[in-house]
Image: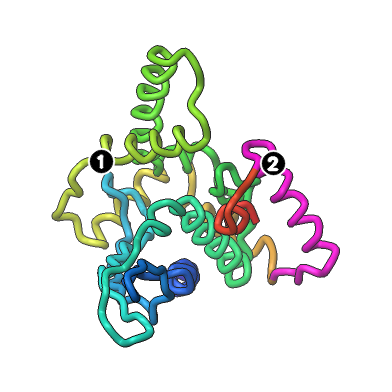
Amino acid sequence: MRDEVVEAHDRAVEAVLGWVEDHAHTRMRHRGHVMCVDAEGIVVGLFRQHTSRTLDPQLHTHAVIANRVREPERRWLALDARTIKIDQRTLSALYHAGLRSELTRRLGVTWHRPENGIAEIDGIDGEVLSEFSQRTRDVERRLGEKLERFHGRLGRDPTEQERWRLEREASVDSRPAKPHGPTPADLRREWRDRTQALGHDPRLVVRQAIEQRRGLGRVDGRGTEVLTDAALASLGDHQSSWRPAELVREL
């Protein structure tokens, strides 16, 4: 099962990088004019890690994208990274949606309703989720402090974009150095002991989370219309116009 989880994660990462590659472009000067042109792919280094900075189980991959792409005339120019920076929420939504679908297809995992593009696995006790979410608690505590200061200074709640920036700042500000030393066997033993200390059987926790559903149904024409209408309605509640990447995020 461990291999299937890793493969599901890798497929979700590939989907995100595929989207980045499809939209990668550079700027070049032609006859005195600056133009944006499509790039011939991207160069990426991937570094897979299996724990958070607080050494809770958290499978994730760091992607380092080289700042050089080849344009149609075969020259190597700088990647125009503005799209990647602006559309980080879209990339996050693509990854989490891809991971959910892959884990459902491979292991029968079901999910709670997503919030801000992220959903918890159904069937896992909330006490267990909380125990292994130390990093999340640190970020939420820091975000709460930032939101309180924002409201006190401006007298209003942040917009969607402002809150996203505050969330990013909270993640960076609360980020500890990752400790070194524990081996994978040490970590698995610690995770098992922490789960048992809560009164749960680690093997049962896993069994309750998988085999809940097998396969994914195809989205027919009517389903596509429903999803599109819901995405447009969600966007319309917050803004009067949107870019294609924002629609992709909502879908």
> Percent x, y for residue 110?
64, 56
Whole-percent x, y for residue 49 in the image: 30, 62
Q: Quadrant of residue 233?
A: top right
Residue mark closest to the camera, 2 vs 1: 2
Mark-to-mark CA distance, 2 and 1: 34 Å
Question: Disc 1 marks which amino acid?
Answer: Arg
- Badge 2 local density, few (<14 within 10 Å), some, or many (20+)? few
Q: To which quarter of the image does residue 228 belong?
A: bottom right
The part of the chain drawn in magenta is: 216-240
Q: Name the residue under label 2.
A: 236
Q: Is residue 219 in the magenta section? A: yes
- Residue 31 vertical position relative to residue 61 in the rendered view, above or below: below
Q: Quadrant of the rendered structure where residue 166 is?
A: top left
Tell whether 83 sits left or right of 179: right
Q: Does the magenta stretch include residue 215?
A: no
Q: Is residue 112 above or below residue 217?
A: above
Who's the residue at 60% across and 49% down the image? 242
